[in-house]
Image (tube, helix red, strand yellow):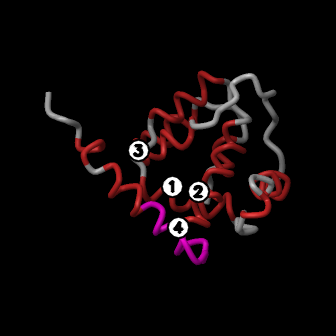
Amino acid sequence: MPMPMEYRQASRDFDAFMEDLRDTSMLQTTHQSYTMLQGVFQVFRRRLTTKQALAFADMLPPVLRALFVSDWDVEEPRLPFGTLPEMTREVKALRPDHNFSTDTAITDVAAVMRRHVDLPAFEAVLAELPPGAKQFWTA
């Protein structure tokens, strides 16, 4: 079997995602949008079981998948979905001295995510996750 195209062009796809996120969130650099994306992923992941999080990760493009599972403490207590402002504060708490996340961080990432994933697969996974997951990713 030949190398899947998603792996062959993983870096290019990730760069396109990050540039889209930078522009959508009106940040200055992709470094700033990286921390925002990482924060959004961690906030979402904290609300899922390990099995649910891995199902979500499986439908992400390769580099986003790797970022979603990196630095994961699987023993961390699972949290309930909260309000958008509460979860946005949690996003901003990641590396607070170097975090430029916007007040619209979650909706910005959600909008970009929908432009860069297989949308039917994305919706199918969200339908299997706990209440609040679909709303989290609604832009």
- Residue 89 screen position, x and y as percent: 83, 57
- Mark closer to the chain start, 4 or 2: 4
- The secondary element bearing badge 4 is classed as helix
Q: Nearer the viewer, mark 4 or mark 1?
A: 4
Pick the residue in front: 124 or 37. 37
Q: Residue drawn at (52%, 28%), measured in percent from left and top?
A: 55
| Residue 90 within the magenta-colored segment of the rendering | no
Amino acid tagged 3: Pro
Amino acid tagged 2: Ala
Please tell me how crowded label 4 is: few (under 14), some (14-19), or many (20+) other residues with Cα within 10 Å: some
Q: Is the N terminus in the top left, top right, bottom left or bottom right quadrant?
A: top left
Q: Residue drawn at (63%, 44%), measured in percent from left and top?
A: 134
Query: Which residue carries the number 2 mark?
Result: 110
Tell me whether the residue at label 2 lies in contact with that at label 3, contact meaning CB atoms closer than 8 angstroms.
no
Tell me whether the residue at label 2 lies in contact with that at label 1, contact meaning CB atoms closer than 8 angstroms.
yes
Query: Which residue carries the number 1 mark?
Result: 113
- Residue 105 screen position, x and y as percent: 68, 62
Highlighted magenta segment, given as a residue range: 17-29
Query: Which residue carries the number 3 mark?
Result: 61
User: Which of the 4 quarters of the picture holds residue 25?
Assistant: bottom right
- The secondary element bearing badge 1 is classed as helix
